[in-house]
Image (cartoon, rainbow, N blue to C red):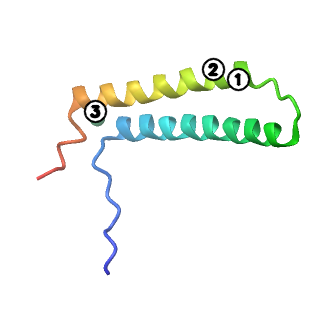
Amino acid sequence: MKQKKAMSVYCDTARVLLEGCEESFRVVLALHDLQLLSAVDGSRTGLGDLMAKADVKKRHARSTWLRHVDQHGCATAARV
Ligand SMILES: [Zn+2]
């Protein structure tokens, strides 16, 4: 099967916002991994505040990206 060529449909701003969104998701996942490991070995991590802040950043990054593509229309411009 032929693999589709990767092509971005977003403008430069949307791509930067999406990268920020992806990074914020990675941070949240990494913190969840650390919390899971601490639960397994019984240690206390004190990650609650960090996880809450990371979750706020994730939601903000996601909503900023969604608002941009909705207002700018760059997500639908490439659809034909
Ligand atoms: Zn855009």
Question: Label 3 sits on what residue type?
Answer: Val
Quarter of the picture containing the N terminus is bottom left
Q: Is residue 10 left or right of residue 23?
A: left
Q: Residues within 10 Å of mark 3 (few under 14, many from 20)?
A: many
Report how far apart the C-alphas of labels 3 and 1 lie in the structure: 29 Å
> Dot 1 lies on which element?
helix
Q: Position of residue 66 (x, y in %)?
A: 33, 30
Q: Is mark 3 within 8 Å of ligand 1?
A: yes
Which mark sits nearer the N-terminus, 3 or 1?
Answer: 1
Nearer the camera: disc 2 or disc 3: 2
- Badge 1: few (under 14), some or many (20 or more) residues near its Cα, within 10 Å? few
Ligand 1 resides in the quarter of the picture at top left
Q: Which residue is mark 3?
A: 69
* CB-based contact (under 8 Å), mark 3 and mark 1: no
Disc 2 + disc 1, Cβ < 8 Å: yes
Q: Where's residue 56, x and y in %? A: 55, 20
According to the image, label 1 marks what residue? Answer: 50
Residue 41 against residue 49 in the figure, above or below: below
| Residue at numbered disc 2 | 53
User: What's the CA distance linking mark 2 and mark 3?
Assistant: 25 Å
Q: Is residue 8 found left or right of 45 in the rendered image?
A: left
Image quadrant in which you'd find residue 36: top right
